Image (cartoon, coloured by chain):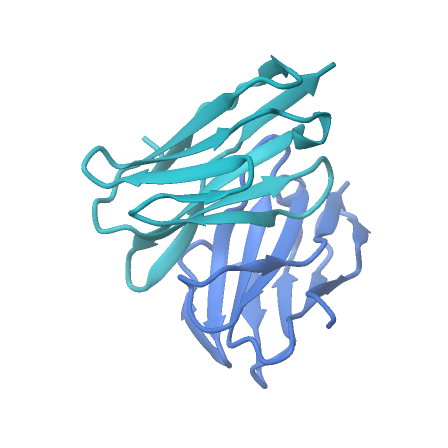
């Protein structure tokens, strides 16, 4: 079956622009996660949904970052007024039930802020 | 101090060698441990879960030591195709269990 998909795969934004990154999880997966990965580092947790409920957003670096999953399926990560330090790969993952289950990752969106 | 720590390497080994990586975690209430593999510019992919009793999958063996708070990955008979970054994941209890990644250990297997 289809895996996790993300779009766009690449995004170049000028500093100060708003961006929206989309994630389509595996069908039927309850949990969805967003991570930020800088070069040479492991993925850093941003936020986590179970169905439409955002259970944890402790990793969001500032109030410029906002995530939603209104119908418990597709999720969008929005970054307002992008800064150069936001440049990274944004990974989405889904798992069958909880945060303790195996996660399946999408290919990521590589964001470059100029 | 980071909650999950890994030696970034690189570990440079010849084909056929046995290599082991460790990953330490700081929160004793952690649950659910995994090893993921990440190839350059690709997404992480599950290599194996880690159980208290230890588990083996072909050339790969993973173990959990709760007393000393680390997990390990052993790769026997290394292949060129094993070259990648190996990420450990520990679910750390906060409000909920948060999957927390180490920074990864780079493995280079050479002919």
Q: Identify which residue, B8 or B19, lies in the foreground.
A: B19
Residue A61: x, y in percent?
Answer: 48, 50
Q: Is residue A7 above or below residue B76?
A: below
Q: Is residue A25 visible?
A: yes
Display colour for chain B: cyan
Classify residue A61 as left or right of residue B64: right
Question: What residue is rendered at 55% in x and 35% in y?
Answer: B59
Q: Is residue B15 above or below residue A103?
A: above
Quarter of the picture containing the C terminus of chain B is top right
Question: What residue is rendered at 59% in x and 26% in y?
Answer: B106
Question: What residue is rendered at 73% in x and 48% in y?
Answer: A111
Q: Identify which residue, A12 or A108, lies in the foreground.
A: A108
Residue A62: x, y in percent?
Answer: 49, 54
Classify residue B27 as left or right of residue A84: left
Residue B15: x, y in percent?
Answer: 66, 18
Question: Which image quarter: residue A26?
Answer: bottom right
Residue that sits furthest to the bottom in the current view? A71
Question: Which image quarter: residue A43?
Answer: top right
Quarter of the picture containing the N terminus of chain B is top left
Q: Is residue A81 above or below residue B4?
A: below
Residue that sits furthest to the left in the current view? B67
Question: What residue is rendered at 72% in x and 54% in y?
Answer: A107
Q: Is residue A61 visible?
A: no
Q: How many marks?
A: 0
Classify residue B32 as left or right of residue B17: left
Q: Is residue B81 above or below residue A93?
A: above
Chain whose colour in the figure is blue: A
Residue B41: x, y in percent?
Answer: 73, 39
Q: Identify which residue, B85 or B52, lies in the foreground.
A: B52
């Amino acid at each position: 079956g289809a895996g996790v998909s993300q779009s766009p795969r690449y995004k170049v934004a000028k500093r100060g622009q708003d961006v929206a990154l989309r994630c389509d999880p595996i069908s039927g997966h309850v949990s969805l996660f967003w991570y930020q990965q800088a070069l040479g580092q492991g993925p850093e947790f941003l936020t986590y949904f179970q169905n439409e409920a955002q259970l944890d957003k402790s990793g969001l670096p500032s109030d410029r970052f906002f995530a939603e999953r209104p119908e418990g399926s597709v999720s969008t990560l929005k970054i307002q007024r992008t800064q150069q330090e936001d440049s990274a790969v944004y990974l989405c993952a889904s798992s069958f039930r909880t945060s303790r289950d195996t996660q399946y990752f999408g290919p990521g969106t590589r964001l470059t802020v100029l | 101090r980071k909650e999950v720590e890994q030696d970034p390497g690189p570990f440079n080994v010849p084909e056929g060698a046995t290599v082991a990586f460790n990953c330490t975690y700081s929160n004793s209430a952690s649950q659910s441990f995994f090893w993921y593999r990440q190839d350059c510019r690709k997404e992480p992919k599950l290599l194996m879960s880690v159980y208290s009793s230890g588990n083996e999958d072909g050339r790969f063996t993973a173990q959990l030591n709760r007393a000393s708070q680390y997990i390990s990955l052993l790769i026997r008979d290394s292949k060129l195709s094993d070259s990648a970054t190996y990420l450990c994941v520990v679910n750390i209890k906060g409000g909920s269990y948060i999957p927390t990644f180490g920074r990864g250990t780079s493995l280079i297997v050479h002919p």
